[in-house]
Amino acid sequence: MHTVQKKVCLLGDFAVGKTSLIRRFVEGRFDDRYLSTIGVKISRKTVTRADHLLNLLIWDLAGGDDFSKASASYLRGAAGALLVCDLTRAATLDTLVDYAQ
Amino acid sequence: MSDPFEATNAAAAAPQPDGDPQFATLRAILLDEERRRIHQLEQETAALRATDQQQAESLAAQVQALQAEIAALRQTNQQQADYAAVLRTELTRLQEQLHTESQSLVPKLIQQMGFIIANTIRDKRDELAEALGPIMSDAIRVQIRDSRQEMVEALYPIILETVMKAVREFLREFQRNIDARLKSAFSLGGLLRRSSARLRGVSAAELTLRESFAFSLEELFLIQHDSGLLLAHHRASQEDSGDSDLISGMLTAIRDFARDSLGDGDDSQELREIEFGDERIIIQSGQYVYAAAVIKGIESTGFHARLQELVSELHIQHKPQLRDYRGDPATLPNLAPQLQTFAQSAVTPEAAVPPEMTSGQRWLLAGGAGIMLLLTAVACFYLQFTLALWPVAFGPTPTATPTVLPTATATLEPTSTLAPTATPTFILTPTATPTATSTPTYTSTPTPTATTEPTSTPSPIPSPVTVRGVWLRAVPDLDAPIGVALPEGTAVTILTQTGDWVEVVWEDADGNVQQGWLGVRWLAINGVPLSNEGE
């Protein structure tokens, strides 16, 4: 079957659960231990569509107070992005505006 | 005006006075044709009159219509003149307004023009390039012709950077080659290899490469710059070395991180090589994609240039597809074969296999090796001979050696390891052949064979004493467990010697005989140490 690749970035403040979200989506499991992501972690998830396979390369970017230039460069060529926040921390929702811009 | 035909007809039709019917018949025969002709002319005349009347009426009507149209045109002209005057007034007003508001209109226009240009570039990139290409080429040509100096100054930074990049690449490869040659040139194997290469008519580097096959291209990736998506991949072996998609992504992330963190904002500086264990990743970048080659060993000469040529060639062949790549490999179906072709050519020696040596060359090589061995043997013999004669020619005379130390030491040391010397360092220079190395007994009577020509009167030498507090050990080894401690100045009796160690016995305060090993440097006789090591 025909395969198409797409790059998707995961953005959000630190400790909102980006890596856990991806681990659950890609590996189907959850780990309650918290290990801060350094730099970027790339995972792959293949999704079957109607007429082709969608190969998602998910770039889990390290969250932080400062969305640095290095992190911004990771967004280049991305077909989409997921913005993640923690509903128990309102500040992480406010930060998403900065990420979206 | 009277009609002459009517008069003729009337005259013809009027009855003659004589009333002669024949005359009337004759007249009718002679004038009938004329009458019909006259009648026809009368009809034509009437028709012409009617036509003239109609044309006159038509012309009159056309004149009236033209007069009306002229009047309408005059009216329209007047209206247009009025409208032009209004437009002129409006234009004057707009010009005044433009003049007065130019400071604010220009930025707005620039912004709008920017949007328009940006949208055009994004949506109609190819059309824009095709449209502007000839114009820009002509403009550049004209600028170079008319303003050469200005163009040089404008292009100087770009050209300089390009040239410096090429020079850096060349120097890096040149240094790599020099290092590889130096490593192999000054070794015995290198000398033999060079000799063999000379005889076979190839360079030593080529021969080394062919013989060792140290260089191998393990994997080759073609990756999109921005997204890190893998466009094509080639692996030399069948074994799975990892997820190539994730490798390409992480490689791109590392490149981005290095450029953003270490590049100081200069996008032209890029990560070019990564080394891990015995593998290296060579990176050659293009406009839209870059190639990453995982290699082992020292790459062949020109490998970097060939990899760069591959990237450039792919850009020339597939530029639109590479630029617009959105993750669908079907748009670039021919990349994998090209990578495979390159990988195969990269590890194949360009030149043919060098010919084997002829029999004459082999004999020559064997003769050279024999001469080398003979010269080496002569050199060794000469060196040994020189070393053997050196003490005879320049050493001290040994005449006083036996006069100092008598053989009376044999009463204590039947092993004869203590040889007489001029200074009491006889332990190190035995002149006798020690034959009794068995377990010593105090009652044995040794045969003093070590005395060559003793002429002095033998006298007993004092027992060696410790020069400081020292531990006795069970075996002659520093790592051996320690036994009892000998205080400084303790007299001991030496039993045997092994290297720098001596086995001694001594009697403690309780009368118990202790035995063990200690370093010879801790013993002295009359204040003279038995070994010079400590000095």
Image (tube, helix red, strand yellow):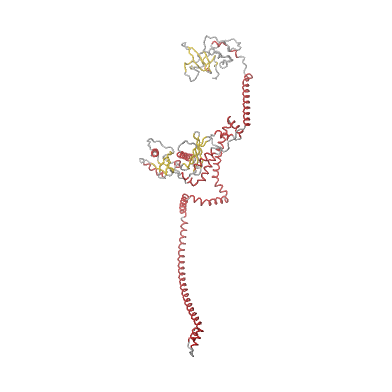
Could you say where residue B477 lies in the image, as x and y percent from the top left?
Answer: 50, 19
How many circles with numbers are drawn on the protein? 0
Which quadrant: the N terminus of chain A? top left
Could you say where residue B299 lies in the image, as x and y percent from the top left?
Answer: 54, 36
Residue drawn at point x = 54 percent, y = 43 percent:
B162
Q: Quadrant of residue B163?
A: top right
Q: Relative to the observer, which residue lies in front, B234 or A61?
A: B234
Could you say where residue B196 lies in the image, as x and y percent from the top left?
Answer: 60, 32
Q: Relative to the observer, which residue lies in front, B190 or B46?
A: B46
Work out which residue is located at the far front of the displayed protein and give it.
Answer: B22
Q: Is residue B301 above or below residue B408?
A: below
Could you say where residue B42 lies in the image, as x and y percent from the top left?
Answer: 48, 80
Work out which residue is located at the far bottom of the displayed protein and give it.
Answer: B18
Which quadrant: the C terminus of chain A? top left
Q: Relative to the observer, which residue lies in front, B97 or B440?
A: B440
Work out which residue is located at the far left of the displayed protein and give it.
Answer: A88
Q: Is residue B245 above or below residue B473?
A: below
